Image (spheres, rainbow, N blue to C red):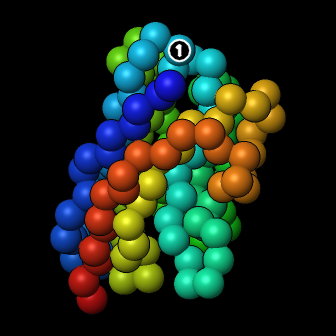
Amino acid sequence: QVQLVESGGGLVQAGGSLRLSCATSGRTFSRYAMGWFCPAPGKEREFVAAISRNGGSTDYVDSVKGRFTISRDNAKNTVYLQMNSLKPEDTAVYYCAADSSVLLETTSRTYNYWGQGTQVTVSS
């Protein structure tokens, strides 16, 4: 069992930055690829970014490429999402998730564990 706790959300003006953190329990953090998702109307949670177990591979949805950076610190059992040049359309609840599969997945249904989410609000 892996427990995930997100933090770092808040209210920021357009063009600003936020850094989300997701702290995990247990000593098996390095066995999981990690991802960030946000809800989409009428859809499963929408992929934002993912990082492989050792941090060597990352993937992003096109809309955040060049603005968001996902990273992880396996010694601290924590994954981060640095969000720069924020736009009002980035407003959402952001969920952290852990995936035990070997491949770097962008589909929410493959992820095994989820956090409670952290709200990001970007004002124009």
Q: Position of residue 93 (x, y in %)?
A: 38, 66
Residue 21 visible in rendering: no
Residue at x 78% of width, y 28% of height: 102
Q: Which of these two is toward me, 22 or 83? A: 22
Horizontally, residue 35 falls left or right of residue 68, namely right
Quarter-wise, where is residue 79 in the image? top left
Q: Position of residue 54 (x, y in %)?
A: 62, 20
- Relative placement, left or right, of 27 versus 12 is right
- Where is residue 52 drawn, in percent x and y? 66, 31
Residue that mark 1 sits on: 28
Q: Residue furthest right?
A: 103
Q: Is residue 8 left or right of residue 23?
A: left
Q: Specify the quadrant of the image occupied by residue 75.
A: top left
Residue 122 on image: x %, y %: 29, 77
Residue drawn at point x = 46 percent, y = 11 percent = 27
Residue drawn at x 42%, y 60% as measured from the top left: 94
Q: Is residue 105 visible?
A: yes
Q: Nearer the viewer, residue 55 or 109?
A: 109
Q: Secondary structure at mark 1?
A: loop
Residue type indicated by callout 1: Thr
Residue at (36%, 56%) from the top-left corner? 117
Is residue 29 placed above or below 51 in the rendered structure?
above
